[in-house]
Amino acid sequence: MGSEEQTRMEEMFDNLRADKYPLKEYTYIGKRIPRRIDGVVKAAGQAVYTMDVQLPGMLHMRFLTSPYPHAKIKNMDTGKAEKLPGVRTVLRYDDPEIPEFAPISGHTPTADEPPLPRIAHFQGEEVGAAVAADTETIAEQALTLIKTDWEERPFNLDTEAAPLQDTAIANLEMYPDSNHINEGLLDVLELGDVEKGFAEADKIFEFKSFRRLHTWVGPERPCGVIKWNGDCIEAWVKQQRPHIAKRVISKWFGGIPMNQIQVHCLSQGASFGGWSQTNWNMGGHYCAAVIARRTGRPVKWTFNRREDFYGGSMDEGAYFYKVGAKEDGTITAVWGDSILSNQIYPVFNPLKHLVENTRIPNIYCKHKVVMINKGPTVPTRCEQNSAAHAFTMIFDHVAGELGLDPTEVALKNDGADGHDMDWLNQQKAKRGFEVRDSLRECVEKGKAAIGWDEKWHPPGEKKLANGRMHGLGFTWTHEWDDSAGSSEMAIRIERNDGTATILGMGCDNGVDAESSYCQVAADELGMRLEDVHYNPQFDPGYFRMTPDSSTNMSINGFAVRHAARILKKKILEVATTPVGKSQRGEFPPAFPDAGPEELNIKDSVIFLKADPEKKMPLSELVGASFNSGPLVDPEALGVRTPFTVPLFAFGYHTQTGTYQPNQPRPRFCRQGHFMEVEVDTDTGQIIVTRVVNTNDVGKVINRASCEGQQYGGTYMGVGRGISEEVIYDPVTGVMLNGNLLDYKIATILDSGPIDTILIESGMGYGPYGVVGIGEDIATLIPTLLGPAVYNAIGVRINDFPITPDKILTALGKV
Amino acid sequence: MTDNPNKNSKYLCPYCSTQYQTFDDLKTHILKDHKNEPIPAPEGMIAMTINGGSYSLRAEPELTLYDLIHDRLGLIGSKQFCDRGACGSCTVIMEGRAILSCMALAVECDGKQIETIEGIAEAEHPLIESYAKHHAMQCGYCTPGFVVTAKALIDKNPAPADNEIREALAGNLCRCGTYPQHPVAILEAAVEKRKFPEGKKRSLKPTEDADKLSFEAVKQDALDKLKGGE
Amino acid sequence: MKRFVHINAKTVEEAVSCLNRYGGKGSLIAGGTDLLGKMKDMILPNYPEALINLKTIPGLDYIDEKDGLFTIGALTRLQDIADHPALKDRCYALAEAARRTASPHLREMGTLAGNICQDIRCWYYRNENNRFPCLRKGGGRCYAIDGDNRYHSIFGGSVKKGCYAVHPSDTAPALIALNAKIITSKRSIKAEDFFKVGVKTTTILDSDEIVTGIQIRKPENGSKSAFLKFAIRKSIDFPLVNAAACISSAGGKVTAARICLNAVYVKPYRAVKAEDAIIGKAITEENAAAAGEAAVVEADPLPHNAYMVQIAKTLVIRTLLACRE
Ligand SMILES: Cc1cc2nc3c(=O)[nH]c(=O)nc-3n(C[C@@H](O)[C@@H](O)[C@H](O)COP(=O)(O)OP(=O)(O)OC[C@H]3O[C@@H](n4cnc5c(N)ncnc54)[C@H](O)[C@@H]3O)c2cc1C
Ligand code: SF4
Ligand code: FES
Ligand code: FES
């Protein structure tokens, strides 16, 4: 083991400064790669998803769901269902093998929940019974035969009214006293003195905004398969954290040894956090495991499309603001309040980005989390939706109120922790970064791309020849890779051809991180990209960092890099060290007269630096496997051949991240987004004609993948901004639009062209200076519709999504 | 058929499903009206051509074409996203039309020619390579549906314009939002297809020079070629 | 889906006899894009016991033009209508309505007859597992009145004055504007008389009656038609409001006008007042605006859908302007 790299590895933990050990030269990193690693498999329809799994004798399991938003099962008669031909088992809430609580969360191993609850807290919740049958259709038919006697309870659906005295309590079991559940817990954010700040302001204004519930919509529905092999359990999981799945399963049935659990994490029909992060995520698996044991058959459980509308995003609710600013756009104080619903754990205060991202010295914000009778809200393409929403709202209101260009207001207030850019620049230098003005670079490039200077106009003033109103909007924030995370990854050189395999199970949710890790390994090892492969679905016993928190590359990148560097060192040592000492003598190394430092590897060939003609391909170094074993016989064919020890190395990384206590780590990279819209003031239609994304990702690893995040984030954001809303019947609390026709995600026609601009300031804390990009765009774009529409029609609509009725109402046409 | 609701009318004509009270009536009817017709397939049996291969299959009435190809035949490239006709990920080509297999009853596809993503890949359609090259996917769940839709488009319109591609894909939902990457992949595949109408064997390893793959350049190049009739 | 009997009809007569045989418990299936969605969601209290497939009847899939008469077979797919050169030229409103219906895939499957015979889309009615047994299913009440009615009728209700579910078809208003006739196994019906709201029904068809085709007299020279659709997304979505108009003019003045809105009322809504307002006048911005106002004078929106009035008015104005010579 290379002890120097070992030292670096440890030094990199809690990484609070610039990457000290980047490469001098990049062959693949930062480039467009000619074929994404899973490209052919996915385009050809060969990728296997958990939904596609079929095993011999497999039973299909479906859950009963609640027709009411809040109700308790008084009694249940499952007799008829049990008798239906093809039904194998009906599992009930009162089954002796169903504990009241069990560890079933897919997100954290700590929260216990009822695997088969008796009480429903939202309409459509899986409760009371699960049926396993020969086919899905039979299971569904059996569910209709279950007779349930419900005790209906009062419910509440209104986030704003939830904390009030006479509102129905949404969850009597967990929060019997009040719907307001986070008093004293992450409920206030405070910086400076807001009263003082307001006193310094030239102008003070107050406003309010709403974000209606929206949700993840995973293309592959929640599902899973469980199979027992004797006392060993095999699980196919559709979720982002296979290591949590394994750990959670190990606690079931009195404990299952970790080495007797085999987890399969196949291709994932994306979940964007979402379903994967719910506390009940492993509940289906638990019930399936009980039935699978009882019947001796593998069991696949599924949700239907409607049931995937299980919960939503954490930004649902109402926001209140009071902002003070000087005439020139300098913001002196922001006071805020918010009521957000059903967060599985109270997350960030909505004004958090103001602290992280600006020089505003005085900030105070309350953050109430309340329970209502809708599904849980979880990180849905990020938990920072609320922070991004508030940030955009505040900045655009300041620009609007003061009649300033929003890009100017942004630049004026850029900073961090209440400090200005001078302070921030000192921090950059202190931490070893090149000092660059990230926001300014984003703004300049973005403005040029969209033609801002020619097109910018005061709100409501530009009518186009087609009769529509033209609007431009801008928003920004930092780039984030926020949370703690860790990773174990390894690389192995294969016998016979010297190709490299990366190891480390992880959820492949489509961001093409796998190609990126291959790029890193190839560049670090000096190998050709096509000689490096990675299949994250295989469980070698350890796991990489989960694809959440935009923290894929910034943590796993280190782990792969460490592994590659250690491995390279090992390869060069092996190439120069005699092996196989025995009574019959020793075998000379491949390069008998050189020391490891005299060699290098390029294009998968080892060569002598001083004389590149002296070379040996890696394939030759590792040798071929032989008749009865993986190592070549040293005296094969009567010739004494060298052989090599197994070439394998692992790397690991752990990082505390910004959102851990006592780890202040100012962010230096920024992003800016520009949107051009046309608004039809007679129908209320918004047409997004162009979007420009500028993202300072520090360093690009996989170019097409970064652009993919920009395109994808923009489309998801546009959908969230103009049409995505989970709608409940106010009278019965029943969800009305849990399908893909009535819940409207954007189609290809719903956005105009998108410009993807990537800036590489190197100011990220990840390897080579990277910072994550996955969550940001979809999180910022929805609220950007607000500024763009305001600029078009000159009237504010602070209620998202901005649907035609809201536009027409705002224009006084209703 | 297990639960025929018409319990009192016992004798159903296998040719035209008219019902008769007695066996003799049925016999007379068959001899009179269907004498020269070939023997009908046993009830519930259907015949189809899928990706050029012929199939004889049992299908219950409620089975959708999706259920049949995905669950029964294991052609898992057809994906179910919405299960209600609203997303296009279950698209197959039937008699030249890109249709939704989740909204088609298998029994109604009797005698039809069907092409799935598996057949398109097997025929070395250039779409597969261009999709991989242009990263026209993220999670990939919706991707086969896009590729099948694109194949049907290129069959009908070998030189589609940018807006024609966008219109053709307007029934395919992609939650990952990969939309802008599709037209360029399809444009390039259309050009390739015209160069190699019979398909071109994909090499196992990509040979393209990585640096040349600028999105805009490829798009412009493909557009020029299409316009120039090349 | 629940099990049912499936019958491939070979002739219209056979399909009629099957309908009779199953007495209200049989259902016709054409493209299936509407019917199968209903069956999958199990929205109805009772299930069709038999599906009678019309696609196996030869000779119902055609577009024919003879002696100034277009005849379109019941099974003609919407995409074929949208692509038909003569229809695009002479019956533009219909071709355009077909082109704007649903999504490309659904247009390759959905038939013209299925489109006008399709069921309503009220989200209470369509909620899974018959969660809301409302008036249209023979139940006792309408859930939309007190509930979320943002997509419901702005011109009042029907079925004991209770049901506010709009008729969702895109082609229906075009057919009415073009004064089409619906040909059935029994009779010929003027398109505007074809729609009727009842428990479980949306048309005047008898329980054993089948649409076999649609006839449109080729609009005379000097007439023009148009269709506009407003929906939330640019594809897939049902209309929030749509409008079709067919206008004949002579000497710069409108001599005849047929204007029809849909998705605003329980049936397609012929905007007679708007027609009256424009007949005898030139189609100017001003006159079109007056006709637009006239189209919605009788509007009586529900608590959440008043915005639809403005959209309906706008679409009437714009379809008229699109018919300008
Ligand atoms: C996601 C989605 C989006 C959609 N968007 C739109 C839209 O934007 N605009 C729009 O107008 N529609 C839309 N539709 C509805 C779509 O189903 C219809 O447009 C289609 O034309 C129906 O035709 P079909 O042949 O598939 O009907 P089917 O489902 O086969 O039949 C519909 C009904 O008509 C009856 N029927 C069919 N043929 C006949 C006949 N010849 N005689 C008597 N009765 C008959 C059937 O019994 C059935 O009750 C959408 C559907 C879906 C699933
Ligand atoms: S509007 Fe009509 S279909 Fe909808 S709930 Fe009311 S009665 Fe039923
Ligand atoms: S699954 Fe068939 S259209 Fe969505
Ligand atoms: S790639 Fe994930 S849904 Fe399209």
Image (spheres, rainbow, N blue to C red):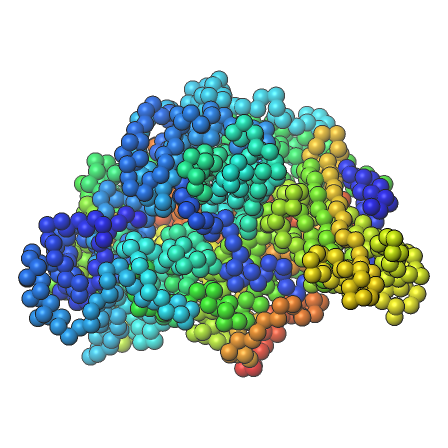
In x, y percent, where is residue A283?
Answer: 48, 34
Residue A289 showing in the rendered view = yes
Q: Quadrant of residue A69?
A: top left
* Number of numbered discs visible in the structure rendering: 0
- In the rendered image, the quadrant that contains the C terminus of chain C is bottom left
Q: Is residue A656 above or below residue A36?
A: above
Q: Which residue occupies 24% across, 77% down? A: C65
In x, y percent, where is residue A569?
Answer: 84, 52
Q: Nearer the viewer, residue A166 or C19?
A: C19
In x, y percent, where is residue C164?
Answer: 27, 44
Residue sitting farthest toward the top? A177
Q: Which residue occupies 65% across, 43% down? A: A541
Q: Which residue occupies 22% across, 40% down? A: C135
In x, y percent, where is residue C314?
Answer: 37, 55
Q: Is residue B228 above or below residue A605?
A: below
Relative horizontal placement of residue A481, taking residue B172 as reference (left or right): right
Relative horizontal placement of residue A19, taking residue B148 as reference (left or right): right
Q: Nearer the viewer, residue A340 or A491?
A: A491
Residue A207 showing in the rendered view = no
